[in-house]
Image (spheres, coloured by chain):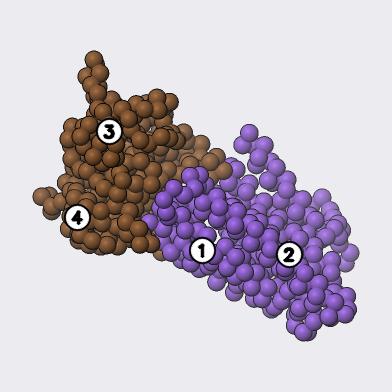
Chain colours: A purple, B brown
């Protein structure tokens, strides 16, 4: 049966779901969209998009190392995303104490003083450069060519196994459960670090834990969208939702709705057109973000 | 509880890195009193707050806060750090900010307004308390807007509501008037005094400029040159007291309208507030 697009959406859906790999892709995409949308909403609020982007690039050294030692790519993703999160957290270390005489005056969301924010950016940039260099080292030691380089960078929906879907589900449930557990203090620390600190919220620890959870979410998302386009699911739906509403619950719900819509539509379009999944998802996500910005104006 | 002092310091001194920041501080604040902590930059005002919050030990003397050691009753202290500005990219509402003051430091998600009875009750109680305190600071109109879209004065009222939402017995406000225009400085001070009286809460308010505060103050703790003087505004804002404190001749003049003007104030710079002439600082009604 050739993939063919008809005007009847029901029969299209039926055709789409007649392939087990498409069902796996839809399941994986759904899991990833929900996790990325929720973690992404917090990331955008905390202004850590650069850290998120850096974590997404971790899949390159991750995949290179996995190829070198003969592991599946995915394990390399998780390993390096978690290591990258720790590296960023350490690089930011100690910078977030906002106490003291004088101090910075302008705190925004994300709480840290200006100096500490800048420090984190610099540390994150260093981690990014280091990780890319490491990836090239692994690659040259490996001596071969990374198979499926395009998939690594731009994502794919073929060849997602049921086992992978199950792994994604376990990771997503774990990440979301932990996010829910640290929810209120994390929100407080994200909006106003100084007050949170004064109220006994472990601001530093929460920051590290959030980066780790973000790393896991990124590693999972990269399997669907590819390393370069993690952004599409992590940033765009969340940023669009925050453009449209300042209500927390509605913002989170909107973010998830956008991510799901983008993923499902993207999968459908890719299936019928053979365009790369990363391209369709990213384009749709961009349209959502752009529309949200225009609506707000 | 009512007769108890909110803050009591006896001959207290603080050293940081071997250097004494201030010493010989005798000071008390009662419930329902509005106290201004004044002094030039670097005189140790923030250090004093850190001592009261139990973040810095004293080197000498004694400090009692709400009847216990500093830090022992921090859950009964509403603390507003130096003014932070939320810009328009901070996409949460003022009401969310106040709510976080109520239960933001608890783990987990807030109780949903549906489901089992205890959840619903807790959600409703929290909502009511937040609405109450928002009404108290007069922020009903803009509490539903994104905090970054509120003006500086509006943000400050919401932050005061956040500090008040858990019914503290001691409110510590670190330069809450900083960066506000004069009408807002006066309005926020009047608001703080009203809350101070109606709730019987002791308020320590750190300030740079005493002018907008003077009509509302009960006491002043003036830190300068490593020393401190405490008392009523009439006792503290005098030529003798200030001259002794600064170790230089300072005059307090009374204008024809009955206002007090401090002349010869050594604090050469004034980062915020109105363009007051260099040598004329404090005006007392």
Q: Nearer the viewer, residue B38 or A202?
A: B38
Residue B249: mark: 3
Separation of residues labelled 1 and 3 (CA atoms)? 44 Å
| Residue hosting label 1 | A94
Q: Nearer the viewer, residue B100 or B33?
A: B33
Q: Residue at x 38, y 56 (%)?
A: A198
Please, what secondary structure does the residue beneath circle 4 have? strand
Q: Earlier in the sequence, mark 2 or mark 1?
A: 1
Q: Is residue A280 visible?
A: yes
| Disc 2 to disc 1: CB gap under 8 Å | no
Separation of residues labelled 1 and 4 (CA atoms)? 34 Å
Q: Residues within 10 Å of mark 3 (few under 14, many from 20)?
A: some
**Residue A196: x %, y % from top left:** 42, 56
Q: Residue at x 70, y 57 (%)?
A: A231
Residue A129: mark: 2
Separation of residues labelled 3 and 2 (CA atoms)? 60 Å
- In this view, B222 is above or below B70: above
Marks 1, 3: nearer the viewer = 3
Q: Residue furthest bottom?
A: A69
| Same-subunit check for callouts 1 and 4 | no
Q: Nearer the viewer, residue B267 or A277?
A: B267
| Residue hosting label 4 | B11
**Residue B204: x %, y % from top left:** 27, 45
Q: Chain of mark 4?
A: B
Separation of residues labelled 4 and 3 (CA atoms)? 26 Å
Q: Chain of mark 1?
A: A
């Amino acid at each position: 049966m050739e993939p063919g697009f008809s005007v009847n959406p029901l029969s299209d859906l039926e055709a789409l779901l007649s392939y087990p790999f498409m069902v796996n892709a839809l399941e994986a995409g759904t899991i990833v969209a929900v996790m990325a949308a929720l973690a992404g909403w917090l990331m955008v609020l905390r202004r850590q998009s650069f850290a998120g982007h850096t974590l997404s690039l971790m899949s390159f050294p991750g995949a290179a190392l996995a190829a070198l030692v003969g592991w599946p790519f995915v394990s390399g993703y998780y390993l390096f995303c978690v290591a990258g999160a720790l590296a960023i957290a350490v690089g930011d270390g100690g910078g977030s104490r906002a106490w003291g005489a004088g101090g910075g005056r302008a705190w925004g969301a994300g709480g840290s003083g200006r100096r500490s924010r800048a420090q984190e950016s610099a540390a994150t940039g260093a981690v990014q450069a280091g990780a890319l260099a490491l990836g090239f080292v692994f690659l040259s030691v490996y001596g071969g060519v990374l198979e499926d380089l395009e998939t690594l960078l731009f994502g794919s929906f073929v060849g997602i196994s049921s086992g992978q879907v199950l792994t994604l589900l376990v990771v997503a449930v774990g990440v979301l459960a932990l996010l829910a557990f640290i929810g209120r203090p994390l929100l407080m620390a994200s909006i106003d670090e100084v007050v949170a600190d004064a109220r006994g919220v472990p601001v530093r620890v929460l920051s590290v834990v959030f980066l780790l959870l973000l790393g896991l979410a990124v590693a999972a998302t990269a399997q669907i969208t590819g390393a370069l386009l993690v952004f599409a699911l992590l940033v765009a739906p969340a940023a669009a939702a925050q453009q449209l509403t300042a209500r927390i619950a509605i913002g989170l719900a909107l973010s998830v709705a956008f991510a799901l819509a983008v993923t499902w539509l993207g999968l459908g379009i890719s299936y019928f057109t053979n365009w790369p999944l990363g391209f369709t998802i990213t384009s749709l996500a961009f349209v959502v973000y752009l529309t949200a910005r225009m609506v707000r104006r | 509880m009512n007769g108890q002092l909110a803050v009591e310091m006896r001959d207290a001194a603080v050293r940081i890195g071997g250097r004494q920041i201030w010493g010989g501080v005798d000071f008390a604040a009662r419930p329902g009193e509005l106290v201004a902590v004044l002094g030039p930059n670097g005189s140790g005002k923030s250090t004093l707050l850190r001592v009261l919050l139990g973040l810095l030990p004293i080197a000498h003397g004694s400090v009692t806060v709400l009847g216990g050691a500093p830090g022992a009753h921090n859950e009964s202290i509403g603390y507003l750090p130096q003014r932070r500005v939320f810009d328009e990219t901070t996409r949460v509402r003022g009401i969310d900010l106040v709510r976080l003051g109520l239960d933001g430091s608890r783990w987990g998600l807030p109780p949903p307004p549906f489901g089992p009875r205890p959840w619903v009750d807790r959600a409703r109680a929290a909502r009511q308390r937040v609405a109450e305190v928002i009404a108290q600071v007069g922020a009903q109109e803009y509490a539903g807007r994104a905090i970054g879209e509120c003006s500086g004065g509006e943000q400050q009222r919401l932050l005061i509501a956040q500090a008040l939402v858990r019914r503290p017995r001691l409110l510590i406000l670190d330069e809450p008037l900083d960066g506000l225009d004069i009408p807002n400085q006066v309005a926020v001070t009047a608001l703080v005094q009203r809350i101070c009286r109606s709730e019987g809460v002791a308020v320590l308010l750190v300030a740079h400029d005493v002018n907008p505060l003077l009509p509302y103050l009960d006491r002043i703790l003036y830190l300068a040159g490593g020393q401190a003087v405490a008392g009523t505004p009439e006792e503290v804002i005098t030529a003798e007291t200030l001259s002794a404190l600064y170790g230089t001749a300072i005059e307090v003049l009374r204008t024809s309208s009955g206002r007090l003007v401090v002349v010869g104030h050594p604090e050469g710079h004034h980062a915020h507030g109105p363009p007051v002439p260099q040598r004329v600082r404090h005006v007392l009604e």
